[in-house]
């Protein structure tokens, strides 16, 4: 598969912006090349455009070579960049599933690219053939999300393999919640599939949503395209410095994940005991989707109590559901106590 053939013509021929830090990357005594102010160290210097140090840490953490890693301002950045690189507005299209993460639709809409959604079944599982049937010769990207947001379930890995190996375009698997899932990541499948992109993020299990750091993993032709079209300094110096520090906290992260999974299991059980809760869907993520009588009423009541959950009632297949993020055990208990007042 020739990734360059899939690109928009203007991106194929694009000559990227060349920054001072691209042209000279070595050590030097005096830097007078970037019109920086010599005062106010270290914030006066432009950050490393390719984030070498951060990538080296992530490379060790994930066992993926640095040239297969793209870092973005959240994983929302590579979602947008992939669409802009591969989809010709008003001509090309994207296939995704329904329900799923809302940013694929928003990013497609902003770029003027059609996104066709294939419904999941009642168990929120996807049909590989249905996804493939929804593609045509102008489909450049398929966005899949596993574990899925807002449903919480992991997609069937067999179905994912069928889609990635059969589709003649790019398949993106968004693994934002993979750290909470018992199933295996598809990360190392990038060695096998030149058309596969895996998205992960430091916003969830790693507790760093505020520093905006997301990852895309793929073979080098795709990574090179993302690097070519991104803002030259897409990750600021504060994010890069903080990431280097926080990436050493792997053990804390593992403990958080264990604790949050235990809380999730407890909450699943306790929520089910409320007579107005019809169903709590199985979750491989750090949230639960719960179906209940008058979800909107429950939502409004919780807001009055100062507890905010996400009303997903208007989402396809999610009528009368609330998406509840797992908090600390105190926070979860506050929610349960508030719900008890509805009995
Ligand atoms: C939260 C989430 C993200 C994370 O986005 P960031 O921009 O990295 O914070 C990505 N995908 C899905 C499905 C999510 O739920």
Image (cartoon, rainbow, N blue to C red):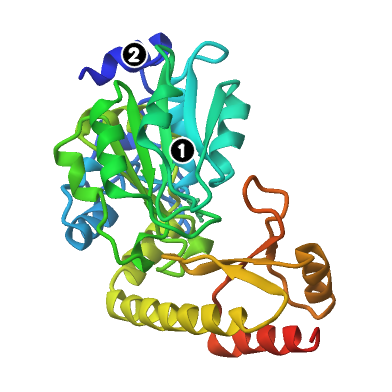
Could you tell me residue 215's position as x and y percent?
Answer: 36, 49
Q: Nearer the viewer, residue 216 or 340?
A: 340
Q: Nearer the viewer, residue 67 or 287?
A: 287
Which mark is on residue 209?
A: none
3 vs 274: above or below: above
Could you tell me residue 238's position as x and y percent?
Answer: 45, 60
Asked which quadrant contains residue 246, the reply is: bottom left
Q: Which residue is mark 2?
A: 12
Q: Residue at x 46, y 56 (%)?
A: 43
Q: Which residue is mark 1?
A: 79
Nearer to us of marks 2 and 1 is 1
The answer to whether residue 162 of the structure is visible from this angle is yes
Q: Nearer the viewer, residue 250 or 91?
A: 91
Q: Element under label 1?
A: helix
Q: Residue at x 54, y 32 (%)?
A: 117
Asked which quadrant contains residue 192, the reply is: top left
Mark 2 and mark 1: Cα distance apart in space: 19 Å
In this picture, residue 121 sits left or right of residue 258: right
Q: Crowding at label 2, few (<14), some or many (≥20) Cα neighbours within 10 Å?
A: some
135 vs 199: above or below: above
Which circle's residue, 2 or 1, is located before the other in the chain?
A: 2
Could you tell me residue 35's position as x and y percent?
Answer: 44, 37
Q: Element under label 2?
A: helix
Q: Is mark 1 within 8 Å of ligand 1?
A: yes
Quadrant of the frame with the C terminus: bottom right
192 vs 94: above or below: below
Q: Crowding at label 1, few (<14), some or many (≥20) Cα neighbours within 10 Å?
A: many
The answer to whether residue 233 of the structure is visible from this angle is no
Quadrant of the frame with the N terminus: top left
Could you tell me residue 340's position as x and y percent?
Answer: 74, 88
Q: Residue at x 53, y 56 (%)?
A: 151
Q: Nearer the viewer, residue 209 or 52?
A: 209
């Amino acid at each position: 598969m020739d990734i360059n053939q899939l690109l928009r013509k203007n991106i194929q021929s694009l000559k990227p912006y060349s920054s001072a830090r691209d042209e000279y990357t070595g050590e030097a005594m005096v830097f007078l090349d970037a019109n920086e102010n010599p005062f106010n160290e270290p914030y006066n210097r432009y950050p490393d455009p390719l984030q070498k140090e951060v990538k080296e840490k992530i490379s060790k953490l994930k066992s993926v070579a640095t040239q297969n890693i793209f870092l973005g301002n959240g994983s929302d950045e590579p979602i947008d960049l992939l669409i802009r690189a591969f989809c010709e507005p008003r001509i090309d299209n994207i296939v995704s599933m329904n329900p799923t993460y809302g940013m694929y639709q928003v990013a497609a809409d902003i770029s003027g690219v059609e996104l066709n959604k294939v419904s999941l079944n009642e168990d929120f599982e996807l049909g590989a053939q249905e996804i493939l049937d929804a593609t045509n010769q102008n489909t450049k990207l398929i966005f899949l999300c596993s574990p899925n947001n807002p449903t919480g379930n992991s997609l069937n890995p067999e179905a994912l393999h069928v889609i990635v190996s059969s589709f003649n375009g790019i398949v993106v698997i968004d693994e934002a919640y993979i750290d909470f899932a018992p199933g295996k990541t598809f990360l190392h499948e990038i060695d096998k599939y030149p058309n596969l992109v895996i998205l992960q993020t430091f916003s969830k299990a790693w507790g760093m949503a505020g520093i905006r750091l997301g990852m895309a993993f793929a073979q080098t032709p795709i990574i090179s395209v993302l690097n070519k079209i991104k803002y030259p300094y897409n990750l600021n110096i504060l994010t890069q410095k903080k990431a280097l520090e926080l990436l050493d906290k792997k053990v804390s992260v593992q403990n958080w994940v264990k604790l949050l999974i235990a809380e999730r299991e407890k909450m699943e059980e306790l929520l089910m005991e409320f007579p107005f809760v019809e169903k709590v869907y199985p979750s491989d993520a750090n949230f639960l989707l719960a179906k209940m009588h008058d979800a909107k009423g429950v939502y409004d009541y919780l807001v009055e109590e100062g507890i905010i959950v996400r009303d997903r009632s208007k989402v396809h297949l999610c009528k009368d559901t609330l998406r509840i993020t797992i908090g600390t055990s105190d926070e979860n208990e506050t929610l349960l106590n508030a719900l008890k007042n509805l009995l």
